[in-house]
Image: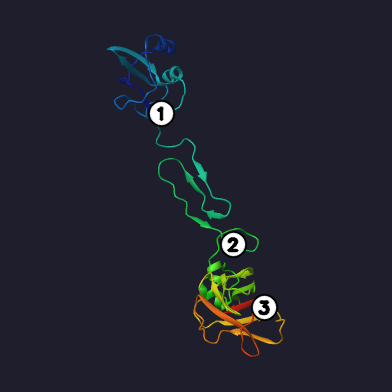
Amino acid sequence: MAISFPYTFANLSGNVPASDLDTNFNYTTTLAANATVASSLTGSELILLAQGGVPYSATITQIVAAVGTGTATQANQLTTGRTFSVSGDATGTSTTFNGTANLTIPVTVTSATTSTAGKVQLAQASDVAAQVSNTLAVTPSSLASLPNGAKAFCRWAGQATNGTCSIIKTYNVSSVTRTAGGTYTITFTNALADANYTINVNCSLWSGGSMMVNQTYNNTPSTSSFSITSTDLSNTGRDVAYYSIVCFD
């Protein structure tokens, strides 16, 4: 390793005690490009230190002893290399770093299992519909493609006047509105994929006797809503205490 001072150096004969360096020589550990001792010099070789035209000679051993040790302001390489590694929910090749070049460690995130945390691939709509994979993760949007799952359900209280009804429990139904005696329009929160869904309708008993409840005969379901009507046997609209619907697509 080269030793550098802001002075000129040359091989000489003679000697100067280390104590004289402290007394007579204003040395510094700052590196200077115009004053570098060659790395081939040994601890016993004599060199000249010239300051203000006045020469001083000393061995490298004496100079190092006088200057002492410290922290360099810069270095091209670490004295002791360090090894970098990755642990936890990812893996990577351990790599040694000594400061002479940039360091890159390719990292692979561990795949999740039933007992290990890690990355997991999200299921697509087609994966949910196929119902085959046991490793893909489903999301709320992908669940909408589950063929045997209800796309919407709702239970609400019937009423004798037109207007918004009181919903008791619901999934994917934003509102139920009475539009006529026994007729109610159900509006989805999120539209269904198409209008070819099935509708199951139930209602509580009518105090006046037998009755029917079905999808309104003159209303075509849409992807966003549909209507039902409850009537007595003479086809007169009747309101009852409670209604419930379930839709499958």
Q: Could you tell me residue 126's position as x and y percent?
A: 51, 76
Is 72 placed above or below 105 here? above
Q: Could you tell me residue 111's position as x and y percent?
A: 56, 62
Secondary structure category for the residue under label 3: loop
Near-viewer residue (71 or 217): 217
Q: Tag 3 or tag 1, which sits nearer the N-term?
A: 1
| Drawn side of residue 7 relative to residue 188, left or right | left
Residue that label 1 marks = 73
Name the mark nearer the viewer: 3 or 2: 3
Secondary structure category for the residue under label 2: loop
* Residue 78 visible to an observer of this rendering: yes
- Choose top left, top right, bottom left or bottom right for residue 162: bottom right
* Residue 139 visible to an observer of this rendering: no
Name the mark nearer the viewer: 1 or 3: 3
| Drawn side of residue 27 relative to residue 209, left or right | left
Residue occupying the point 40% across, 9% down: 23
Q: Could you tell me residue 236's position as x and y percent?
A: 61, 86
Residue that label 2 marks = 112
Q: Tag 1 or tag 2, which sits nearer the N-term?
A: 1
How packed is label 3: few (under 14 Cα within 10 Å), some, or many (20 or more)? some
The amino acid marked with disc number 3 is Val
Near-viewer residue (100 or 153): 153
